[in-house]
Image (cartoon, rainbow, N blue to C red):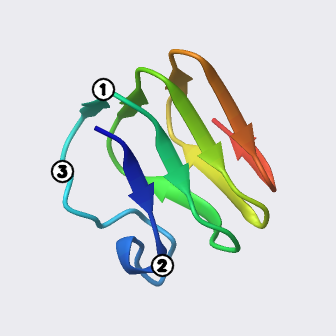
Amino acid sequence: MNLKITQADIDENNFYVGSLKGDVVIDGSIEIENNLGYVRFKHGLKANFAIIAKAGSGIKAGEGIEAGWGIEAGSGIKA
């Protein structure tokens, strides 16, 4: 399963509010579409493959960011 995060999946404070709740492991990759700024997560999110944030997007996590193969960000990664 791959997870694609779009504008519809984040709130006005850039927190992920999509269909996945709590600590989640994605057996695939996570892709964040262009120009979303830093996408923030209130719970754990792990990808067994890649985490990719396209140009103008980044990732913020409270405790850590983990991927099985690699992590890329267009704007930045903060953990």
CA separation, marks 1 and 2? 22 Å
Q: Position of residue 70 (x, y in %)?
A: 65, 23
Residue 1 vertical position relative to residue 67 in the rendered view, above or below: below
Residue at figure coordinates x 62%, y 43% from the top left: 52
First along the sequence among labels 2 and 3: 2
- Distance from the alpha carbon under mark 2 to that under mark 3: 17 Å
The residue at 62%/49% (across/down) is 59
Q: Amino acid at mark 3?
A: Lys
Asked if residue 74 is positioned above or below residue 30 in the image, the reply reads below
Q: Which residue is mark 1?
A: 27
- Residue 47 vs 48, above or below: the answer is below
Q: Residue at x 52, y 23 (%)?
A: 66
Residue 24: give x, y in percent of width and height. Answer: 25, 34
Q: Residues within 10 Å of mark 3 (few under 14, many from 20)?
A: few
* CB atoms of marks 1 and 2 within 8 Å: no
> Residue 51 lies in what quarter of the image?
top right
Is residue 11 in sight in this rendering?
yes
Looking at the rendering, in which quadrant would you find the N terminus? top left
Q: State the residue lying farthest toward the bottom.
A: 12
Question: What amino acid type should be assigned to the residue bearing mark 1?
Answer: Asp
Q: Secondary structure at mark 1?
A: loop
Q: Which label lies toward us, 2 or 3?
A: 2
Q: What's the amino acid at mark 2?
A: Gln
**Residue situated in front as seen by the camera: 32 or 45:** 32
On the image, numbered disc 3 is attached to which residue?
21
Task: Give the residue number, with chain letter if any, for mark 2.
Answer: 7
Left or right: where does residue 8 sit relative to residue 25? right
**Percent x, y of residue 75:** 81, 56
